[in-house]
Image: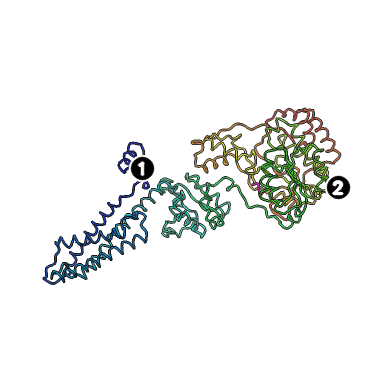
C-alpha cells in the first residue's frame, strides 16, 4: 500500500491517528538524492569558507561547474560503492556511520588526487588552497550526512515515545528509596510496559526542587491541593513492602479520594528476576486488609508433622487445602485428605502430586457423617495429627437445611473426635468460626455444639488425645466469601449487593488462618478454644466502596450499590468471645485462649444423639429446637425459627 493510499484510508476510514510504524521507508534512490544534495551544499559551504579565509588575490574557481561535477560524481561513486543509502535511516547504527566516514574520506582523497593531476597536466589549479578546502569539505560533508541521519533517527524516537506516552498510563512512583527508584528505572528501561513514569511522590518536604532519573518529585500536599486532571496523572505505583498498614491505608484513601488508579509494585525478588512487567498489578482489597502473619514456631510445627501420619478433613476447601500445602512442606510419612466434593478434591490432588512428588498422599472421597467409611482410615494409618476442617458453612443454605448441618457439623465432628480418642491420635484440631459465639443462625449454633462435644470428650476416662479448637472470622478469598462475590459483580458492571449498610465483619487471609491452625496444634494442651486477635472489624459498605474504586470505577455512578436486607440467620456484627467467656494470654500476643462454658460428656453425648435422630427424620423445627437446648445462647435472627425463642 502506498503512502497516499495509507493516508486516504486513515482519513476516510475514521482513524485519524497516524501510527509511525505505518509510514513506509523512503526508496533508496530518494535517500541517495538527499545525500547528493548535502554533498552539493558541503561544496558550496567549503568554497564560501575558503573565500573568507583567503587573503590572496589569486582567482578561486567558485563557479567552476567542472569542479562541482567531478566532486559530486566521485561522491556518488563512493556512496554506491559503500551503499551508504541502503540502511534504514530511523534505525541507523555505527556500521552506517562508518560507511559514511569511508565514503567521504575516499571522496576527499580522490578529489585531491584529481585536483593535483589537473594542475600537473593543465597547468592551473582546479581548487585554490586545495588542502584546506578538502579538509573543510570532508568535515562539512560528513557532518551534514551524519546530522541528517541523526535528526531523522531522533525525530522518530521522540515521536514514538510521545505516542507511547499518550497511550500509556501516567503514574507517580510512591517513595524515593532505592527500591522505588529501581522499580521506576525498570519501567523507564522497558518501552513495552503500558506505564509512563511522570515522577516520584514522597511525604518529605525537602525534595521539591530535586529530580530523580530526570523526573520531578512531588510531595503529599501537591496531590491534596490538585485534581487528577490538573496533575495530568492516571495512577500511583506503591510498594506495600516498604510501608506499614497505617501508612498504606492513609495514602490509598487519599489516592482513591482523588480518583487515581492504585498499582502494586513488584517485590525485590521479581525485580531481580526481570519479571517486573508481569508483576505490576492493580492494588487489591486483600492488600489493604492483610496484616503481619502470626509468627510460627517452625521447629515445633515441623517436629509434630515430620515423618508423621496426618489426616485432614475438608482438605479440598479453602482452609483445608492450605493446611495440606503447609503440612506437606514438613515431609510427613503420609497425608490423608478427605472431602466429599469430587472436583475440588481432584484439583488439590493434581496440585499436590505435582508440587510434592515425594510425599505419600491418599485422597479419599467420603462423607464424615458415615462412621463406617471413616473408621477404616484410622485403623490403617495410625494418625498422629487430625485437622478437622470439613463443615457446612454457608449461613442461608444451612438455615434452609438445618438437618444437613447437624449430620455434617455435629455428627461428623462426633465421629472424627471419638475415633481420634479411640485410636489414640496425639492431637485433634477442629476448625470453628466466630459465628459460633452467641449464634443467630443454625450454622453457628451447630459449630458451637461441635465445640461443646469436642471439649467434653477431652475429659472422658481413658482419653489421651489432646482436643484443640480454633475460632476465627471470615477468610479472604475463601469459597463463597464476600470479596470474590463483589469482584464478580464489579466485573459484570454491577450492581454490588450488600445486605445492610451497617453490617461489619472481621477478616483474615487464608495463610493467617492456616498459621493459626498449625500454631494451635503445637500450643494446645487439650480442651482449649484458641481465638485470634483479628484487629478492627471492617464495614462491608466501606469494603465494597474501596473495591469499586480500586477497580477504577466510581461507586453509585459507574457501579451501583444496593441493599438487599439481612439474610436469614445473619447478624450485623460477629463476635469472637461469648458474654460468659474469659480469655487467657498465650506466648503469642495475637492468640488467646477463650474459657467458654462447657458441658459434661454424658449430657452432650445424649443431646447429640437426639438431634442426630431428628436430623435423620428431616424434622427441621425439632432439629432447631434441640439445637437451642444444646446452645441456650442461640437466638434466631431474621429467620422463621424466631418463633421458637418465644
Q: Nearer the viewer, residue 37 or 238?
A: 37
Foreground of the two, 588 or 57: 57
Estimate the x, y position of residue 79 in percent, counting from the top left. Answer: 28, 59
Say few, some or many: other residues with alpha carbon within 10 Å of mark 1 (under 14 / 14 to 19 / 20 or more).
few
Decide: is 279 above or below 45: above
Task: Report which quarter residue 81 is drawn in.
Answer: bottom left
Q: Is residue 140 left or right of residue 543?
A: left
Residue that appears at 72% across and 30% down: 401
Q: Secondary structure at mark 2?
A: loop
Q: Which residue is mark 1?
A: 17
Q: Main secondary structure of the magenta part?
A: helix
Q: Secondary structure at mark 1?
A: loop
Q: Is residue 136 left or right of residue 476?
A: left
**Stretch of the chain drawn in magenta:** 509-513
Looking at the picture, how far across and down is residue 106, in whole percent? 27, 65
Q: Which residue is mark 2?
A: 463
Q: Is residue 306 magenta?
A: no
Q: Which dot, 2 or 1, sits closer to the camera?
A: 1
Q: Is residue 512 magenta?
A: yes
Amino acid at each position: 500500500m502506498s503512502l497516499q493510499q495509507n493516508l486516504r484510508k486513515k482519513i476516510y476510514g475514521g482513524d485519524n491517528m497516524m501510527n509511525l510504524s505505518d509510514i513506509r521507508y523512503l526508496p533508496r534512490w530518494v535517500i541517495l538524492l538527499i545525500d547528493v544534495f548535502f554533498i552539493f551544499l558541503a561544496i558550496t559551504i567549503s568554497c564560501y569558507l575558503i573565500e573568507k579565509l583567503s587573503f590572496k588575490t589569486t582567482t578561486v574557481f567558485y563557479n567552476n561547474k567542472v569542479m562541482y561535477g567531478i566532486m559530486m560524481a566521485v561522491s556518488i561513486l563512493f556512496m554506491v560503492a559503500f551503499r551508504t543509502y541502503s540502511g534504514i535511516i530511523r534505525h541507523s547504527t555505527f556500521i552506517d556511520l562508518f560507511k559514511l566516514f569511508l565514503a567521504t574520506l575516499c571522496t576527499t582523497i580522490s578529489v585531491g588526487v584529481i585536483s593535483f593531476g589537473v594542475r600537473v597536466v593543465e597547468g592551473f589549479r582546479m581548487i585554490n588552497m586545495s588542502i584546506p578546502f578538502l579538509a573543510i569539505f570532508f568535515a562539512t560533508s560528513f557532518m551534514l550526512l551524519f546530522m541528517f541521519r541523526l535528526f531523522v533517527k531522533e525525530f522518530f524516537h521522540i515521536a514514538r515515545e510521545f505516542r507511547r506516552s499518550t497511550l500509556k498510563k501516567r503514574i507517580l512512583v510512591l517513595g524515593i528509596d532505592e527500591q522505588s527508584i529501581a522499580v521506576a528505572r525498570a519501567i523507564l528501561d522497558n518501552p513495552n510496559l503500558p506505564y509512563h513514569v511522570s515522577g516520584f511522590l514522597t511525604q518529605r518536604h525537602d525534595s521539591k526542587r530535586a529530580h530523580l532519573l530526570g523526573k520531578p518529585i512531588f510531595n503529599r500536599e501537591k496531590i491534596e491541593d490538585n485534581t487528577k486532571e490538573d496533575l495530568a496523572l492516571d495512577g500511583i505505583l506503591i510498594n506495600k513492602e516498604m510501608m506499614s498498614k497505617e501508612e498504606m491505608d492513609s495514602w490509598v484513601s487519599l489516592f482513591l479520594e482523588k480518583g487515581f488508579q492504585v498499582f502494586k509494585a513488584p517485590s525485590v525478588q521479581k525485580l531481580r528476576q526481570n519479571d517486573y512487567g508481569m508483576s505490576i498489578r492493580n492494588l487489591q482489597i486483600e492488600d489493604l486488609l492483610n496484616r503481619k502473619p502470626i509468627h510460627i514456631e517452625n521447629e515445633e510445627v515441623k517436629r509434630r508433622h515430620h515423618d508423621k501420619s496426618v489426616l485432614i478433613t475438608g482438605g479440598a476447601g479453602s482452609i483445608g487445602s492450605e493446611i495440606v500445602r503447609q503440612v506437606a512442606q514438613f515431609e510427613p510419612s503420609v497425608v490423608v485428605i478427605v472431602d466429599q466434593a469430587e472436583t475440588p478434591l481432584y484439583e488439590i490432588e493434581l496440585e499436590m502430586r505435582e508440587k510434592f512428588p515425594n510425599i505419600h498422599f491418599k485422597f479419599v472421597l467420603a462423607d464424615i457423617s458415615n462412621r463406617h467409611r471413616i473408621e477404616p482410615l484410622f485403623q490403617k494409618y495410625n494418625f498422629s495429627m487430625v485437622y478437622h476442617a470439613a463443615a457446612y458453612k454457608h449461613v442461608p443454605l444451612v438455615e434452609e437445611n438445618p438437618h444437613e448441618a447437624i449430620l455434617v457439623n455435629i455428627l461428623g465432628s462426633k465421629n472424627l473426635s471419638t475415633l481420634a480418642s479411640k485410636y489414640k491420635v496425639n492431637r485433634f484440631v477442629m476448625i470453628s468460626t466466630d459465628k459460633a459465639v452467641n449464634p443467630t443462625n443454625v450454622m453457628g449454633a451447630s459449630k458451637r455444639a461441635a465445640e461443646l462435644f469436642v471439649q467434653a470428650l477431652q475429659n472422658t476416662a481413658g482419653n489421651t488425645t489432646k482436643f484443640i479448637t480454633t475460632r476465627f472470622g471470615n477468610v479472604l478469598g475463601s469459597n463463597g466469601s464476600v470479596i470474590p462475590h463483589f469482584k464478580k459483580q464489579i466485573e459484570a458492571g454491577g450492581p454490588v449487593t450488600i445486605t445492610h449498610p451497617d453490617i461489619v465483619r472481621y477478616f483474615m487471609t487464608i495463610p493467617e488462618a492456616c498459621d493459626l491452625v498449625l500454631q494451635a496444634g503445637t500450643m494446645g494442651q487439650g480442651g482449649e478454644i484458641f481465638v485470634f486477635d483479628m484487629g478492627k472489624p471492617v464495614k462491608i459498605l466501606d469494603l465494597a466502596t474501596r473495591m469499586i474504586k480500586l477497580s477504577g470505577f466510581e461507586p453509585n455512578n459507574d457501579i451501583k450499590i444496593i441493599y438487599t436486607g439481612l439474610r436469614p440467620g445473619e447478624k450485623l456484627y460477629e463476635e469472637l468471645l461469648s458474654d460468659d467467656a474469659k480469655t487467657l494470654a498465650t506466648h503469642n500476643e495475637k492468640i488467646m485462649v477463650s474459657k467458654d462454658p462447657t458441658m459434661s460428656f454424658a449430657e452432650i453425648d445424649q443431646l447429640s444423639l437426639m438431634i442426630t435422630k431428628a436430623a435423620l427424620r428431616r424434622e427441621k423445627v425439632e432439629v432447631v429446637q434441640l439445637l437451642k437446648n444444646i446452645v441456650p445462647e442461640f437466638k434466631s435472627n431474621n429467620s422463621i425459627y424466631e418463633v421458637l425463642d418465644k
